[in-house]
Image (cartoon, rainbow, N blue to C red):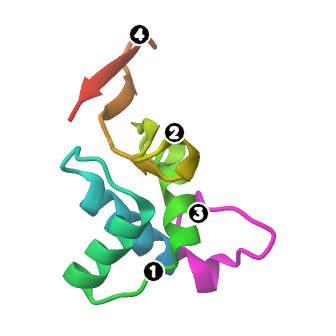
Amino acid sequence: MRPSPFRGNDFIAEYDHNRLDKQLERVKFVMADGRWYTVCEIRETIQRVFQINEPENSIQAQIRNLRKPEFGNYIIPKRRRGRISSGHYEWRITGVQKQDAQGQLYFSLL
């Protein structure tokens, strides 16, 4: 078994890898259509589609993970939703940063 890309002080691969991997895949599944989503909307969609309650802070962590090379190097912009002072944000997957055989970076749109 290859080493888990997940990290953290409390992370124990034997107990946590499969759960986090499935959680990451569920977040990616919801966001794959390229629409803008709040964390709450992602949570609600996961609940409706998979009948699983994911904590919002875990969803936020998986959005951060999706941006990392070891989790796909997804391009995920963030913007404010509603009044600027509301503090509400939304995210979407717009593409993936890839590397060609010569090591040049390029972007692939979804």
Quadrant of residue 75 within the rendered picture: top left
| Pointer 3 residue | 4
State how far apart marks 1 and 2 are (Cα): 23 Å
Q: Which residue is drawn at 22% across and 82% down?
A: 48
Disc 4 marks which residue? 102
Which circle, 3 or 1, is nearer the viewer? 1
Depth check: give the residue in front, 27 or 7. 27
* Pointer 1 with pointer 4, Cβ within 8 A: no
Secondary structure beneath dot 4 equals: loop
Q: Main secondary structure of the magenta part?
A: loop
Type of the residue with mark 1: Glu
The percent position of residue 45, horizontal first and vertical second, equals 26, 73
Q: Are marks 4 and 3 in contact (CB under 8 Å)?
A: no
Whole-Å distance between the Cαs marked 4 and 3?
Answer: 27 Å
Q: Which of marks 4 and 2 is nearer the N terminus?
A: 2
- Taking the magenta stretch, the answer to whether it contains residue 23 is no
Looking at marks 1 and 2 on the same chain, the residue that comes earlier in the sequence is marked by 1
Position in image of residue 95 (x %, y %): 30, 33
Which stretch did the figure color magenta? 1-17
- How far apart are the two marked residues, 3 and 1, measured between alpha carbons? 21 Å
Q: Residues within 10 Å of mark 1 (few under 14, many from 20)?
A: some
User: Which of the numbered marks, if any, corresponds to residue 8?
Assistant: none
Give the percent coordinates (x, y) of residue 103: 46, 14
Residue 67: x and y, percent? 49, 42
